[in-house]
Image (spheres, rainbow, N blue to C red):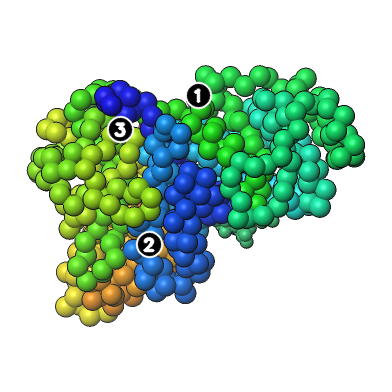
Amino acid sequence: MNLNDEVARRRTFAIISHPDAGKTTLTEKLLLFAGAIQIAGSVKARKASRHAASDWMEIEKQRGISVASSVMQMEYRDCVINLLDTPGHQDFSEDTYRVLTAVDAALMVIDAGNGVEPQTIRLLQVCRARNTPIITFINKLDREVREPLDLLSEIEGHLGMDAIPFSWPVGMGRSFGGVFDLRHDRMRVFRPGAERHRDDDETIEGRDNPALASRFGDAHAKAAEEIELITGAMPAFDQAAFLAGRQTPVFFGSAINNFGVREVLDALVELAPAPGPRAALERSVLPAEPKFTGVVFKVQANMDPAHRDRVAFVRVSSGRFERGMRLKVARNGKEIRPNNVVSFLSQRREIVEEAFAGDIIGIPNHGILQLGDVLTEGESLTFTGLPFFAPELFQAVEVKDPLRTKQLRTGLTQLGEEGAIQVFRPEAAGGALLLGAVGQLQFEVVAHRLKTEYGVDARLMPSRYSLARWITCPDARILKKFMDANAANIAYDVVDAVAFLAGSPAQLRVAQERYPEIEFHTMREHA
Ligand code: GDP
């Protein structure tokens, strides 16, 4: 198969949802329908350790599993599907945002009882900012849930895009009869049961089929009315609008009952885009270019903390990766020749022989690869768009034993590079290092890892800051003037980008009003 064909059959997407909407269940079912059944157990195992900070020890034990199962590759029909999980816990959401930069589409799972929930909204904002096409799965129709029309308008409101139903539920909860496939004009009859995954569902052809009314009574009458309404009022599905992030196809189902899952897989293959061009500062990189390029979008500490080895997750942006090939790290020109690169086919970590644009490969390393790093066959390239978000929580950090200050710095630098936490160095002399996070759990994880991996007992203390903005200004003199006037609030992050730390929104507003020339950024992109 040539490079063009390999690229054309790739589908790389992230699965996003608010915790408990059914992401884990749907993931398992997608794998099941694609024939990668052995995986189901490990998705669950990982999930078991997810919930609270007190589970962190457990999380760590499970880290091997989570490394392997945060990326899953499967083959379905003629396609190779790369599915990237996003951590459900909101305290890890920064990681999630970066995962979204590595995909070409997103699958959003919504609990039909709860509608669009806060955690989903934040993720959607990132998708919207990047015009990522979104496929929507409305889950749990086997329960008494919200009215489908309500759900649609809520989705439209939050996404700012048209929600185009591809199927429509007939009844719900106890009266759930199945879903009507609007494109093929037939009803798929619901049968509960988690074990079944062959296509032996009963179908009834035709919207006007008298069998429907007699079997599903009121539920059918109501669905027929709603379908009438939506087909009259909704725009037709338009592939270009979907790809541009202006329309989302919507499917209804019940993941736990394996119902509506096949339709989602088919939609991924038929509707979701193959890998497209990626923007670099220097030029646009096309997926089927012969030369390999890739970006590190996630760094994860590996199973054995004592060895401090990490896995860099690389999204292949172009060309073909081949085992043992020489790669250049664009940031510093260093050459690496990774031999033990892993892929994630069928959940087993397998040594990869080759990979193509759209695929995700894992490169074990000892810190040579950082978040945002670009790998090439020699070209100097800088990809844009790996986001860091302004932290919302701050703690000052000090080491209990001053003799271990160096270890603290090393540990924080590495954890900062990994993206586990953001580290700020205050401009004011003598100030303690500051940790910035988007979720409280990040602090606990970092304190724990400093201790176990770096032998540092860190003391975390309350900080007077509550928000941060990266600052830039076209006029260097004004920037300098601002920094001098606000020296007590200026700090540098791991890549020495300048940030303004404020104690309150009011303080930020005052600074913004006084210095209209300065730009305050809530997000910093790599480079
Ligand atoms: P996640 O947190 O989004 O990964 O959610 P899970 O997949 O763990 O599901 C959360 C809960 O909802 C679990 O108890 C599932 O068994 C349940 N669940 C998932 N899908 C369905 C469904 O289709 N119907 C019902 N009734 N429950 C479901």
Name the residue furthest bottom. Answer: 401
Marks 1, 3: nearer the viewer: 3
In the visual, does 404 lie left or right of 191?
left
In the visual, does 233 lie left or right of 283?
right
Question: What number is the disc on residue 244?
Answer: 1
The type of residue carrying mark 1 is Ala
Question: What number is the disc on residue 313?
Answer: none
In the visual, does 265 lie left or right of 365?
right
Viewer can see residue 71? no
The residue that label 2 is drawn on is 65
User: From the viewer's perspective, is residue 114 above or below residue 79?
Assistant: below
User: From the viewer's perspective, is residue 522 above or below residue 305?
Assistant: above
Q: Which of the pair 259/54 is nearer the observer?
A: 259
Q: Which of the pair 501/510 is nearer the observer?
A: 501
The type of residue carrying mark 3 is Ala
Marks 2, 1: nearer the viewer: 2
Q: Which of the pair 199/143 is nearer the observer?
A: 199
Which residue is painted at 64% across and 42% down in the image? 200
The residue that label 3 is drawn on is 357
In the visual, does 31 lie left or right of 291?
right
Label 3 vs 2, first from the N-terminus:
2
Which residue is painted at 26% across and 30% down in the image? 318
| Residue 457 percent coordinates (x, y) | 28, 77
